[in-house]
Image (cartoon, rainbow, N blue to C red):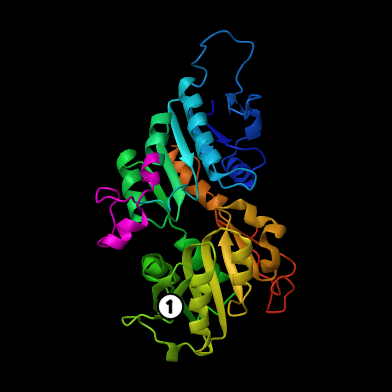
């Protein structure tokens, strides 16, 4: 008998469906849970169990592991989605579930990773009065979310490429080490090596600011090619909407060395696109062949789409951690230079040992490439079409 069930917090989420398919769940996840709400709009999910059985009432999920898959969806706020996670987890435990795992690729409230007092968050930098003031009057929401999930019955949390040292500390503490931050450096390096998006033998991996250095270096290491260069930029904020970017003094590579090369700027997330565009403007002055922006979490907004349509960026590569980016209308005017890597197969491979599933790992490729026909590479103008569709 199957020991785990995969459910989603909303209907029609392609990321949930993909995870269920890769883990060979035969039932549609909406046949396992009813995501109903009362007339007063209160959410009241119900696990669909044997309606005719009066045995083991409140224990029909006994011995089961429930995996709740939650991603940002256009029709729901992140606040609504977070509360849904808590209620579904509570429903699982109140009906006997042994274990509840939350798979949230883009972990909610991670931007609110510290508060206005010294005990509010553990950072890799020394906080000054300006940093405390930035959070003055705000709640320490990342810690609250971790505590709410734990109280609701979540036992383990899986996310992808979280940017915050403070968040990782909070969740590792609250979940007694059962917190997994999956870093897709291997996927990105494989894509850059195997595809036609760059000339990987004439390549520079670039970190746009200090926060991106650690992960960008890991992508660089995973390339496993001494010819690939590494470059580091420094960012200084001049105001709420203005930044200054320059090559870091301790960068391995300087501007004069990137002429004719392909540059891949790597970051964890983008909202307005201001930082990455300013970074690419600095790089473009040195006459590289191409500039690619590779970002895990793409928050689509009108401002971001306008900003990143700047010709200094030749192509944007992102992932399905926020699956609505697959929608061409969400991509908007960027669809001619946007590529989306579907990561559900890669995530499923990680889940197999976590679930103590005896099956072999899923074979590569562990991602699929999705792009609009508006993209020149789709039309083959830049060489033979590369597709990793499994």
Q: Which residue is mark 1?
A: 244
Q: Secondary structure at mark 1?
A: strand
Question: Which of the image's four quarters has the C terminus?
Answer: bottom right
User: Looking at the image, is 306 positioned above or below residue 58?
Assistant: below
Query: At x 57% / y 86%, what residue is drawn?
Result: 289
Query: At x 45% / y 32%, what residue is drawn?
Result: 100
Task: Return the residue found at the far top.
Answer: 54
Query: Which x, y percent locates residue 312?
Result: 58, 80
Res. 3 in view: no
**317 relative to 108 in the view: left or right:** right
- Along the viewing direction, whichever of 240 and 168 lies nearer the viewer: 240
Q: Which residues are magenta?
A: 115-144
- Along the viewing direction, whichever of 254 and 120 lies nearer the viewer: 120
Query: At x 70% / y 68%, what residue is drawn?
Result: 333
Query: Which x, y percent locates residue 38?
Result: 63, 24
User: Looking at the image, is 154 positioned above or below residue 293?
Assistant: above
Query: Which x, y percent locates residue 242?
Result: 47, 73
* Residue neighbourhood size for the residue with mark 1, other residues' Cα within 10 Å, grouped as few (<14), some (14–19), many (≥20): some
Res. 210 in view: yes
User: Looking at the image, is 288 positioned above or below residue 23?
Assistant: below
Magenta-drawn stretch, dominant element (helix, strand or loop)? loop
Quarter where residue 128 is shown: bottom left
| Residue 130 lies in the magenta stretch | yes
Question: Which of the image's four quarters has the N terminus?
Answer: top right
User: Looking at the image, is 184 positioned above or below residue 150?
Assistant: below
Quarter where residue 380 is shown: bottom right
Query: Which x, y percent locates residue 50?
Result: 61, 16
- Along the viewing direction, whichever of 366 and 96 lies nearer the viewer: 96
| Residue 142 lies in the magenta stretch | yes
**36 relative to 274 in the view: left or right:** right
Query: At x 40% / y 65%, what residue is drawn?
Result: 215
- Along the viewing direction, whichever of 194 and 114 lies nearer the viewer: 114
């Amino acid at each position: 008998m199957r020991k785990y069930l995969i459910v989603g917090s909303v209907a029609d989420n392609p990321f949930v469906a993909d995870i269920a398919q890769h883990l060979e769940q035969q039932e549609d996840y909406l046949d396992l849970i009813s995501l109903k709400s009362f007339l007063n709009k209160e959410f009241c999910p119900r696990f669909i169990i044997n309606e005719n059985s009066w045995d083991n009432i409140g224990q029909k999920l006994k011995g089961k592991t429930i995996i709740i898959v939650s991603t940002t969806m256009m029709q729901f706020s992140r606040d609504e989605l977070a509360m849904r996670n808590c209620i579904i987890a509570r429903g699982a435990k109140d009906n006997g579930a042994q274990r509840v795992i939350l798979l949230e690729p883009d972990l909610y409230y991670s931007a609110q990773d510290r508060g206005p007092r010294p005990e509010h968050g553990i950072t890799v930098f020394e906080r000054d009065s300006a940093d405390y003031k930035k959070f003055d009057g705000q709640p320490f929401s990342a810690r609250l979310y971790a505590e709410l999930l734990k109280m609701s019955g979540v036992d383990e949390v899986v996310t992808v490429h979280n940017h915050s040292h403070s968040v990782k500390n909070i969740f590792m503490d609250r979940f007694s080490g059962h917190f997994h931050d999956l870093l897709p450096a291997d996927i990105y390096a494989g894509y850059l090596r195997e595809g036609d998006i760059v000339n990987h033998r004439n390549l520079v991996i670039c970190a746009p600011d200090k926060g991106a250095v650690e992960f960008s270096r890991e992508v660089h290491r995973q390339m496993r090619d001494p010819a690939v260069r590494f470059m580091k930029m420094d960012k200084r904020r001049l105001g709420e909407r203005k930044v200054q970017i320059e090559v870091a003094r301790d960068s391995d590579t300087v501007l004069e060395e990137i002429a004719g090369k392909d540059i891949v700027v790597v970051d964890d997330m983008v909202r307005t696109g201001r930082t990455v565009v300013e970074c690419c403007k600095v790089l473009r002055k040195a006459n590289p062949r191409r500039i690619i922006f590779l970002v895990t979490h793409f928050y689509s907004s009108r401002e971001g789409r306008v900003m990143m349509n700047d010709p200094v960026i030749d192509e944007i590569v992102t992932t399905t951690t926020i699956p609505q980016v697959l929608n061409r209308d969400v991509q908007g005017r960027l669809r001619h230079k946007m590529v989306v890597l579907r990561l559900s197969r890669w995530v499923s491979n990680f889940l197999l040992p976590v679930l103590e599933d005896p099956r072999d790992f899923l074979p590569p490729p562990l991602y699929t490439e999705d792009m609009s026909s508006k993209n020149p590479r789709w039309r083959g103008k830049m060489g033979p079409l590369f597709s990793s569709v499994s």
